Image (tube, grey):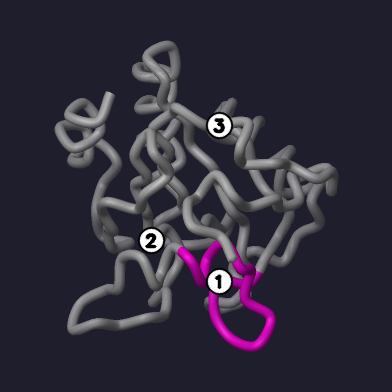
Amino acid sequence: MAKTFFDFTIKDIKNNDWNLGDLKGKVVLVVNVASKCGFTKQYSGLEELYKKYKDRGFEIVGAPCNQFGNQEPGSSEEISNFCKLTYDVSFPLTAKLDVNGDNEAPLFKFLKESQPGIMGLKRVKWNFEKFLVNRNGEVVQRYSSLTEPKSMEADIEKLL
């Protein structure tokens, strides 16, 4: 049974196993992303945060998900190319996954149970929900899709 974020192994965008234990000691922001969403422009702000703080032990994990309005229909290669060419994304992406339902990724089950949403909500409501993980692998904050990346800066700095 996973006790921290670092206990999980997931698939990266190239479908290779990625042991999140490799990120031990870092502050991590996990975001379920989509290429054809009204919030997709947040990729720019996420990349700015990543570039600003990555050398201080900050990591972003983008998790493509097609569960909300079919807004991430592409293949892994299409998603990767879109992110790189459109937003110059340099932070890592996972393989496409489910964040809710019968096939939800165990990582997202852990994130949601660690930081339920408003009124104890245990599901992800939409694309670009964000989970902030401290250096010990504990989920310390959850942000809605409406939260702009820049507004999370103070919370990230406190953990670095």
Task: Give the residues in magenta.
Answer: 98-110
**With 71 as the anchor, is 4 left or right in this view?**
left
**With 159 as the anchor, is 134 left or right in this view?**
right
Secondary structure of the residue carrying tag 2 is loop
Q: Amino acid at mark 1?
A: Val
Q: Is residue 46 highlighted in magenta?
A: no
Choose between 36 and 43: the one closer to the eye.
Answer: 43
Mark number displayed over residue 99: 1
Assign the N terminus to one quadrant of the image.
bottom right
Residue at (28, 58) in percent of width and height: 142
Q: Amino acid at mark 2?
A: Glu
Q: Are marks 1 and 2 in contact (CB under 8 Å)?
A: yes
Secondary structure of the residue carrying tag 3 is helix
Mark number displayed over residue 38: none
Going from N to C along the chain, the mark reached first, 1 or 3, is 3
Q: Are marks 3 and 2 in contact (CB under 8 Å)?
A: no
Q: Position of residue 31 (x, y in %)?
A: 46, 52
Choose between 117 and 1: the one closer to the eye.
Answer: 1
Q: Residue furthest top?
A: 55
Residue at mark 3: 23
**With 117 as the anchor, is 154 left or right in this view?**
left
Q: Position of residue 44 (x, y in %)?
A: 42, 34
Q: Quadrant of residue 146?
A: bottom left
Going from N to C along the chain, the mark reached first, 1 or 2, is 1
Relative to 21, say whether 94 is above or below. Answer: below
Assign the C terminus to one quadrant of the image.
top left
Number of dots carrying numbers: 3
Circle 2 packing at 10 Å, graded few (<14), some (14-19), many (20+), is some
Q: Amino acid at mark 3?
A: Leu
Going from N to C along the chain, the mark reached first, 3 or 2, is 3
- Look at the magenta stretch and give its main secondary structure: loop
